[in-house]
Image (cartoon, rainbow, N blue to C red):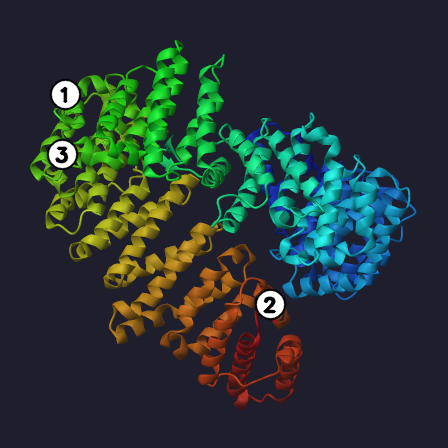
Amino acid sequence: MWNDLLNEQIPIDINVFNSLITKFNTTQDSEERERLNQLILSLNDRSDTYNITIPVMESDFPIVTKLSILVIFKKFVITNLNNISAEEQTKYKDFFMNILYYYLENNKSQVLITKIDEIIVEFAKKYYPEQWPNFFSDIYSQNDKPQFFKNAIDMTTMLLLEVTNYDSTTIPASDQIQIQEGFKNESDKVFEMISNVFDNNYPEDIILSTLSLYKTLFEIFPTTDLIQNQIFERVCNNYLLNQQYTLKVLPIFNSFQASNILDQVPIIQTAFNLMITSLQPWFPDGNLVDISYEDLNTIIFSLTKYISNFSYVLESDDTRDAYVFALTCTFSVYQRSNQDSIRMCTEMWYNVTLRIYHETIFQNMPSFDFYVEAFKQLRRFMVFSMERPNDVIITVDENGVHVRSQIRTESTSSYYVSKDLMSFLTGFDKEDTISVINESITYISSSEPFLFGPFESLCYCIGSLRGSFSVKEENDLISKIISYLLQLIESRPEEEVKAATAAGLMYICSQYTRYLKEFPEILISVMKKLVEFTALGNEALQDASIKAMISIASACSEILCKPFSNDSSFLNFVIENFSSIFENLTSDNTIEMFHVIALIVVGLNDEEELQKYLEMLISSPFQTLQNHSQNLNLDGFDNVIQSLMCIDKIGYLFGSTLIPFLEKLMPILVNLYQVYSKIGNDSILESNCQTQISVNSRILKSTILSLIEKPTRTLPFLERIWNLIQQPLFEVFVPDFHNSQQYCRPSVLLNLLAVVCLKYREFIVDYLPQIFEQVFEAYRDMIDSDDYEFTSFRKGMNIFLKNLIMTGIIYTVPPNIINLCIEYLQYNAHDIEQEVSESAIRTLAEIYASATNKLPQNEAMEFQKCYVNDLCLLAFSLLTDSLHRYEFFAIMDFLREIIASNAFKENIVEIVNSLLTIFEKLSPTDIYTELEGLKSFSNQFMMFNQELNDFLIAAKQVSPRDPALVKVQMETLKKQKQEEEKQNMIEQEKAELEKQEKNAKVNDFANMISNFKLHS
């Protein structure tokens, strides 16, 4: 029954539609709900769904049914309103205005009213670019009815936000500008309405809506014009100072920018004094009262943004008292747990100190004395307000493999702002910074219970000061801190406190490698202490210790691998205690400890020493892999993966020293790969689904490929490497690529193939047909697989193809293979994911353009002629598709490569004629509108426009014509010409007339393209 809704030959039954929506909202079955949702979404594609809008809205159907048809109709108004007659458009506009009045008058569902408002706004965007005054006259005509009036105000706000959103795809940029100009010309009506509300005793909800509209005006139009209006003074006096409305008025000040009201200093100062007066109830005597999280954020955002923009103005005598009070208020925020507000205050102080630093760079202290005391307070708050999230986290990917990932979060960014702020504060007064640190350590040492959060923040603060002191100052400071913290560890009996203190100490040491290098005895003591901490059984301390060791080993490897004084080296200490060091480590930290030792070993300059220590490191993992290969035991899988990942983690550090060990290891790796591939397949066939065994198989296979790919990528061209990987790559790994039951992670193998193509291009040509056969077979199977696998495949495939282009190999493959590549890229170019689409577009551009550099001139010409028509058609179809508006720059670069080629010039007639097929259902005016809609994106289109115009004229395919004639009258001229041809056509001239018609069509369209401009 519901499937009939998708058949355009059968009119939509509103009762069937209602039953579909009702079922969708009542079913608990997730699969059924998804199926019904797809049906509902498909109704958007029917060209006649809008016809049931009025019958549904006039029925007694539930709200959810009416809301669903309103959602569908809104999309119709946005995308297809021009496809119906002007009479129908007027009918629907009037219907929605009438039903809106009815709903408001009878207090109907607010949800439906809001959606109707959105539809009317869409109509307004279509109807009122040139009739703006009528719109305001209409919506304000009901101001004697509060519910009507409030809705009109909300609708005005909605409309202004819509038409000034330059990312909008529902209205051409030219109309947006026209609407803004129209508003400016008729703004008196809006200001009159706002003034009317503020002068009379309207209900609170209308006042709040009007304040929201007024705030929107500040976001859209020049601030100077608005603050000189008497309404601004009225808003400040009547509402800013009224605690009931203060938080609604404060956001108005967020739009004040130094760039647009710099010459309005008295207004800046007056507004600030009023703002501070309005905040007194929340900050009596500068201390923050209890307040909700959201309200505090609203206050602090407005306050800190205003100070950041105008601090240089606020230091004057007229606002100094208010300014001092405002800065004092920020200190009380640091004593709360509202991290968002603390970040805002920190960023504000950073902006202020940065300005002062630049002003006082040749002086010792700021000229404004207040800052001296303020900075002392600020230092004491900052040491306990630092954030230091992990820049690197260990995660488990879809194969269960542990991988290190770089992360950047809001708190990470906040740390770097805080770090720079502390650097400025330290530059103003180093002694006070040192005093604050010492006071803080003493305070935390004596606190009961132990203050874990503040201590962690203090450690991050100390770490952030690296480079802020001279070498001597830094050495003295860090020596004292290490001494303090070691005493603290000894004095506190609680294991958790010891662990936290040790972790903080290790973090500080890892940040001051310059200090550790200067004092090798301390460096070695710290590293030994870190090793000791890893054995204490505290996982958090173990993680922190390992992380600190990696940081220190990366910077100090040459010291750690050599003997110091009469003692042996730290490296020898590690080797002597190898078993005990690894005894209590977690699986992840075992791998990371291998990394630490490898980082130290590579500090050796002697090749024999490198080989000796590398053999020591690899011997245990190698033995595990060999034993497992000879005596397969699935219970030992975790040890096998750990061994593989240990070798994978360290191998690339040793360069060519690794090759002999890799040669011994390769037969074992190939055997494990084949055995686990079979085990994974058998497991899936038995269970008819993925099992833990099959997942483990994929993890192992992907890890083996990664282990081989890293040294292949990092080492230069070596025939010894090629001889090592050739047989397993093309006899085992590539044939296994298309394994419908148990493929490995596809991007890993593609990355390996990409590296091999780049480094060993002379050897790989003969294998390309085999590679492409497997790759594209896997691609076809994977189209319906889960999103992650498919995305992973395409990313790897793009790298592979780029390397083929870079080396020129792609031009040596048989035509059927390169056709497959281009078809694959064309398919991805239409993908809805921007990253996938843009990558495919740029790769196509590289394939097309690089032919001129990689092939002889005549061969390059033939190659480009084969594809120029299809690729130009693809580029224009993407260019006029709103789904791909964010790939605009990539598409334009692609088009410029095509237009610059001789193949384009020689095929211009055929190409332009083909372009007509994109728009075969559109009138010339619609085509022009589609292309004009792109103007908001870039001036770069002018370059393409000029290039295309030059080529068309050079080929004598166009003659100058009036663009307005092309835009507006082309369709009329065509119809007249067709009528004339029908009357005059005779049999013997038929062929010639058809040819003329075709040429005229081509000329018209070519002229339209050549003359339209991205910016008027």
Residue 890 vs residue 328: left or right?
left
Q: Which residue is mark 3?
A: 665
Residue at image coords 17%, 39%: 654
| Mark number displayed over residue 429 | none
Is the C terminus in the top left, top right, bottom left or bottom right quadrant?
bottom right
Q: Which residue is mark 2?
A: 932
Name the outermost residue toward the top: 493
User: Is 299 in front, or is 744?
Assistant: 299
Image spot of residue 87 (x, y percent): 79, 62
Q: CA distance from mark 3 to mark 1?
A: 26 Å
State the SS at label 3: helix
Residue at image coords 9%, 38%: 606
First along the sequence among labels 2 and 3: 3
Q: Residues within 10 Å of mark 1 (few under 14, many from 20)?
A: few
| Mark number displayed over residue 576 | 1
Amino acid type, callout 3: Leu
Q: Residues within 10 Å of mark 3 (few under 14, many from 20)?
A: some
